């Protein structure tokens, strides 16, 4: 079963919003802020911001961010294989 965050993500995509814009809006939409994700992952808020913005491609961090928002990592951060 898909989470409500995953369903919202998919609907926003259908409406034509880019993944980066959706990722940037998710903290306000979910109440799970970048600060909360940073604390959960042990990373700095700046690392979270850079990953959400597409400036960093640390797969482990992408997986942790996706998990915090209950959205599959391959949907949230496409084009990155697990072997990468």
Image (cartoon, rainbow, N blue to C red):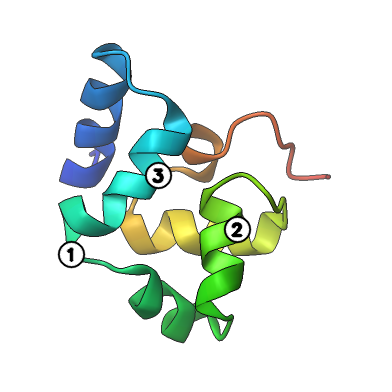
Pointer 2 or 1: first along the chain: 1
Secondary element at tag 3: helix
Q: CA distance from mark 2 to mark 1?
A: 19 Å
Between marks 2 and 1 in the image, the one whose residue lies nearer the viewer: 2
Q: Which quadrant: the N terminus?
A: top left
Mark 1: few/some/many CA within 10 Å (<14, 14-19, 20+): few
- Picture disc at residue 50: 2
Give the camera-side residue of 83 and 47. 47
What residue is shown at x 72% (from left), y 58% (from top)?
A: 58
Where residue 46 appears, as percent x and y from the top left, is 56, 72
Residue where numbered disc 3 is placed: 23
As drawn, is 76 to the left or to the right of 11?
right
The residue singled out by tag 1 in the image is: 31
Q: Position of residue 62 (x, y in %)?
A: 58, 55
Mark 1 element type: loop
CA separation in Å, label 1 and label 3? 13 Å
- Asked if the residue at tag 2 contacts the one at tag 3, i.e. Cβ–Cβ closer than 8 Å, the answer is no
Q: Split into 4 quadrants, where in the image is the C terminus? A: top right
Could you tell me which secondary element the residue under label 2 belongs to?
helix
Residue at 47% across / 39% down in the picture?
76
Q: Is residue 82 above or below residue 11?
A: below
Count of numbered circles in the view = 3
The answer to which of marks 1 and 3 sits earlier in the sequence is: 3
Residue pictured at 26% horizontal, 67% vertical: 32
Picture residue at 68% right of the left edge, 29% below the top: 79
Q: Is residue 10 left or right of residue 46?
A: left
Up-down: is 15 above or below 22? above
């Amino acid at each position: 079963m898909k989470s409500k965050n995953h369903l919202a993500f998919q609907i926003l995509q259908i409406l034509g919003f880019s993944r980066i814009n959706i990722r940037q809006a998710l903290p306000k939409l979910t109440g799970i802020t970048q600060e909360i994700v940073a604390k959960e992952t042990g990373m700095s808020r700046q690392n979270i911001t850079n990953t959400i913005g597409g400036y960093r491609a640390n797969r482990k961090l992408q997986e942790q961010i996706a998990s915090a928002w209950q959205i599959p990592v391959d949907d949230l951060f496409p084009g990155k294989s697990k072997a990468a």
